[in-house]
Amino acid sequence: MSIIIPTPDTRMAAIAEKVHHQERLTLEDGLFLYQSDDLLTIGQLANEVNLRKNGKNVYFIENMTLYFTNVCEAHCAFCNYRKDEGQEGAFTHTGEDMIRYVEEHITPGVREFHITGGHNDKVSFQYYKDCIRALKDKYPHIAIKAYTAAEIDFFSRISGLSYRQVLEELREAGLDTMPGGGAEILSDHYRQKMRVEKANMEEWLTVHRTAHQMGYKTHATMLYGSIESQQQRLEHMMLLRELQDETNGFMVFIPLAVQPISQQAGIKRRTSAFDDLKTIAISRLMVDNFPHIKAYFINIGTQLTQLALSFGASDVHGTLVRERISHSAGALTPAGLTRDELIWLVKGAGKIPVERDTFYNVIETY
């Protein structure tokens, strides 16, 4: 009788067989991949999965990021964007303020307003509805992607309404989809350590489950690179995978590299390029029921985004016009790119640039 002890090579080969046969990877498989230094094989497997789903197409959108308020009741440890009411730099804009800003900065092809902000408890839920209603009335043809699950939970608290009622009222005001923020790491232990003073793990998942049951398609993120373990990252992916099995309501998974507080922060305070590529690739392998994995150039830079397109990513986000949250936390990247720059970036990676709308309907293939 002989006992075969798996070696790293045989373990990787077994995972590759699973990928080839479209079998789901386990937590143990994911941990092995994270602990392996064979980045090229991991990337090759992720690329195989992505090609199966999306061919050589890489998607982007012309969008604008808008920020109505940075006043926030929460004090999350990783955030340098929030302010207290009355603090220098604090702002709370009205819908009319935002329309003036949009008129000054909008480009002709914009198809989406991407809105996130603080949990400002100095205003009512009506304020948040009025903000998006003003935009929808003025720009009815532009999709509104607004309010994370953590914000929906906050609105529920300040209004006394259920999640479903909040989402129904926001839909009536003009909401089309929700961004994926507020997830951070879906672990209550992590959220306690990082002072995530907003929706807990179960609340975040419940908001998205409710939205999906109502017919919303939404986004999901993971903020990696602080105190979380590799196992916590994988458990986060698997929680999303389970919810997607149940609802099929997520369009894209977005791994977000955490940013240091200062732009002057050195290389040791940032995620490594190796970790960024590995996390994107492992995301593509683990979150097997999501159509897309996004490489977010705001957090990892344009050249690494280009490489990520061979490591499982099929989306490079959008033009943004002027991103603020990651940049307030020390991002060194451009605050936006033009359509031509995004097309150049994708073509430079040997892929096909596809301009999309919010729901991944094709506008134009370049």
Image: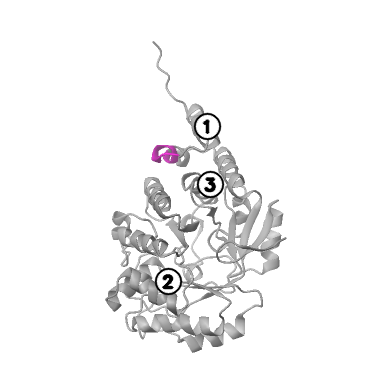
Task: Report whether residue 340 is seen.
Answer: yes
Q: Quadrant of residue 121?
A: bottom left
Residue 32 vertical placement versus 111 (above, below): above
Give residue 350's position: percent from left, percent from top: 70, 51
Q: Quadrant of the C terminus?
A: bottom right
Give residue 321's position: percent from left, percent from top: 59, 74
Going from N to C along the chain, the mark reached first, 3 or 1, is 1
Badge 2: how crowded within 10 Å, few (<14), some, or many (20+)? many
Q: Which residue is mark 2?
A: 147
Q: Which residue is mark 3?
A: 281
Residue 205 vertical placement versus 24 (above, below): below
Q: CA distance from mark 1 to mark 2?
A: 40 Å
Give residue 254's position: percent from left, percent from top: 49, 57
Q: CA distance from mark 2 to mark 3?
A: 28 Å
**Amino acid type at image mark 2:** Tyr
Going from N to C along the chain, the mark reached first, 2 or 3, is 2
**Amino acid type at image mark 1:** Glu
